[in-house]
Structure formats: C-alpha cells, structure tokens
Image (cartoon, rainbow, N blue to C red):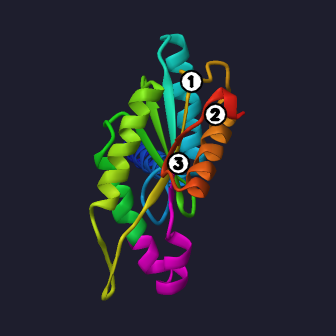
Amino acid sequence: LVEREIEFAMARNEQAELRRQIRSLKRDALLDPVLGMWNRGAIVRSLGLEMERCAKAEKPLSLLFIGVNQYANLKEQFGSATSDALLLRVASRMRSCIRPFDALGRFESDAFMVVLPGASNLVAAAVAERIRLSVITHQEKLGEHAVDVQVSIGIASSSLFPTLDPSSLITQAELALRTARQSGKYIVQATPEDS
C-alpha cells in the first residue's frame, strides 16, 4: 500500500511537471524568439479577441502598423545580430509609449503591430506621434556608428472602419504604412476614401 502511494505521488509530480512544460512551450510558441514579444500569430490573435471585446462594449479599437525605415540597410551593413539589437531598443521605446493592456508584437522582420483597445482614431494618432518622437529623439549606437532611426506608422481604426474584420483592418493599416513610407509623412491614417 505504501509503495502504491509512493508511485501515485511520483506520477502526480511527473504529471504536474509535464503540465508546466506544456504551458511553457505554448507561451514560447507565441513569442518572437529574438525580441521576446508577441509574434505575428499571437498579435493577430490578440487583435481578433480585442476587436470582439470592443465591439461588444461598443468601444473603438485602433491598430498601428509600424515600420523601421532603415532596418534593411542596417541589417545589410551591420549584420543580423546588431540590427536585431537595434530593433530590441526601438521596441522598448514603443512599449514605453503604450498602456500596459495594449498589445505590441512583431509582425514582420522590420514591422510591428500595436493593438489599442478603446482608442479612437484620434487617440491612435496621438500615440503614433508619441512613438515616433520617442524613437527619433534617441540616436542609436551600432558599434562605433551613431544612427538616427526613423519609423513610419500606418493607422487603421474601427472608428472609421466599423464593419471590418481583423484581417481587413490589418490590410488598411499596412496600406497606410506604405503610403507613409512613400510620401515621407511618417504617420498616415487610413480612411474609407482611400480604400
């Protein structure tokens, strides 16, 4: 009887350890391995969940699509490790400009998404400007070189697009980012007239 109790206790401990490992693996699957923030799948999932919550609460939601303008050139010039270290510092500056419950994730190699639940298009524009100023006011050191980093930001909001699904809202934000990069305006708000 004692041996059986010991075997059960060992089995319970092994089972608890397996559960901890599974939770850890699930969390790791949602994180970008380089930057330690939400990866593309996780940030898109967060957007979908927040859009549902905001729709039920009849509140707006805004999405920022942020591109680091010089990333490709810096990666070519300094290599992946150095350019990823730069992205980590830029992401840290972005995180300091958003609320604790806003979601920040890496969408592509040089593009980030910020989900702003409860934020109208006007609030999103103010947050985007705060992020842009936070990034441009800090010169980054890459080895012995000082680099001025610029970001371009596309904004899409359910205030202006109340019927869009998450995928379509992302598309609008991406198009606004592309327009921002091409026009040199740095921040562009997607509007229904642009669609």
Q: Is residue 112 magenta?
A: no
Q: Position of residue 169 (x, y in %)?
A: 63, 33
What residue occupies the far right of the structure in this picture? 195
Quote the CA–CA distance across marks 1 and 2.
Answer: 8 Å
Q: The N terminus is located in which quarter?
A: top left
Residue 143, image x and y in percent? 33, 86
Q: CA distance from mark 1 to mark 3?
A: 30 Å
Type of amino acid at the residue the image marks with label 3: Lys
Q: Main secondary structure of the magenta part?
A: helix
Could you tell me which secondary element the residue under label 1 belongs to?
Answer: loop
The crowding category of the residue bearing disc 2, from other C-alpha atoms within 10 Å (few below 14, some 14 to 19, many at least 20), is many
The residue drawn where x is 45% and y is 24% is 120
Q: Residue at x 50, y 26 (%)?
A: 61
Q: What segment carries the magenta color?
A: 66-85
Instruction: Give the residue at the far bottom of this rendering.
Output: 144
Percent coordinates x, y for residue 2 in the rendering: 36, 43
State the residue at coordinates (68%, 29%): 193
Disc 1 target residue: 158
* Number of numbered discs: 3
Q: Is residue 1 visible?
A: no
Task: Give the answer, above or below, for where 55 lies relative to 148.
Answer: above
In the rendered structure, are the residues bearing label 1 and label 2 in contact, judged by CB atoms less than 8 Å apart?
Answer: yes
Specify which label sits upstream in the sequence, 1 or 2: 1
Say which of 183 and 82 sits in front: 183
Q: Are marks 1 and 3 in contact (CB under 8 Å)?
A: no
Using the image, tell me which numbered label, if any, was put on residue 169: 2
Q: Position of residue 20 (x, y in %)?
A: 43, 48
The kind of secondary structure element at disc 2 is helix
Whether the magenta-drawn stretch holds residue 71 is answered as: yes
**Residue where numbered disc 3 is placed:** 26
Q: In the picture provided, is 20 more to the left or to the right than 55?
A: left
Quarter the C terminus occupies: top right
